[in-house]
Amino acid sequence: MAAGSLIPLVAGNWKMNGLAASRTEFAKVLAGAAELTGKAELMVCPPVTLIRDFAGAARGSGVTIGGQDCHADPSGAHTGDISAEMLADAGAGAVIVGHSERRTDHQETDAMVRAKAQAAFRAGLTAIVCVGEQRGQREARKTLEVVGAQLQGSLPDGATAAQLVIAYEPVWAIGSGLTPTPADVAEVHAFIRKRLSDRFSAAGGRIRILYGGSVKPANAGELLTISDVNGALVGGASLKATDFLGIAAIYR
Ligand code: 13P
């Protein structure tokens, strides 16, 4: 499916950044969002401490708030964890699961990611499921094999296009300033689209596939206009409203 036939999504993953004072920066995102109405959706995934505040500020703006992770269970004795239901209760509409930093820092497996995505569906959240190869895997030409296995293991059955977003984030491109060539991005996104269509039939054609990894205003035009790239998951550049909006501006 050609990019452009789905409403693109530009999501900012703030990671472990943001204090109460960041409300000012977020207000600038909200102020710029109106220009994108009907053309692209914006989402900001702040740390969990800011979700309720940002969700309140975003009400009526069309900007969605997302979490960065959730526990698979709805509640229970899991000190320090946050459930999908808690994120929804705080005003989130989505949650990132299976980010490579979670897979690495917290040894999250595909099975755990799948359970978290299922938890997101249970709580009425959209799950943004991240996949992507490491540098050595790309060099060994194992990218499609790795991404295929992650998709197979991390996605719950029966997902709909409203419930699921995929983010292809090559691990070596995250925070490095490096990006794959447009041809490499096109190859992986076409592969993901095929897998989604095989597994989820018609819904598979409507599930958005984001690219993530060193996206900035200067390369957004090249990366986000590739076929089957339906938006971006942005890390560092999402912390500055002008950069974040500058990326989304390609859809204006
Ligand atoms: P950067 O945009 O900082 O490379 O991070 C990408 C990312 O990990 C988004 O989830």
Image (cartoon, rainbow, N blue to C red):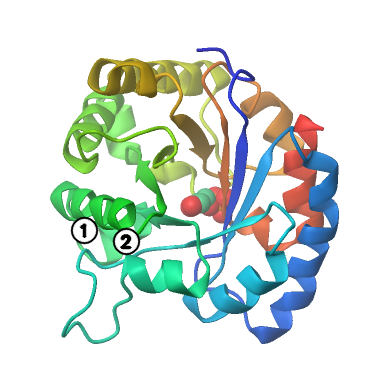
Label pair 2/1, CB-CB below 8 angstroms? yes
The residue sitting at 42% across, 44% down in the picture is 172
Count of marks, rendered view: 2
For the question of whether residue 245 can be seen, the reply is: yes
Tell me the quarter of the picture where residue 35 sits.
Answer: top right
Q: CA distance from mark 2 to mark 1?
A: 6 Å
The first of marks 2 and 1 along the sequence is: 2
Residue in front for this viewpoint, 200 or 175 = 200
Q: Position of residue 120 (x, y in %)?
A: 33, 55
Relative height, residue 204 to residue 58 (above, below): above
| In the displayed structure image, the side of residue 228 where residue 120 appears, left or right | left
- What amino acid does circle 2 point to? Arg
Relative height, residue 196 to residue 115 (above, below): above
Tell me the quarter of the picture where residue 148 sits.
Answer: top left
Q: Which of the labelled discs sits on residue 28, or is there none?
A: none
Q: Position of residue 171 (x, y in %)?
A: 39, 45
For the question of whether residue 141 can be seen, the reply is: no
The residue sitting at 73% across, 42% down in the picture is 247
Q: Position of residue 248 (x, y in %)?
A: 73, 41
According to the image, label 1 marks what residue?
108
According to the image, label 2 marks what residue?
102
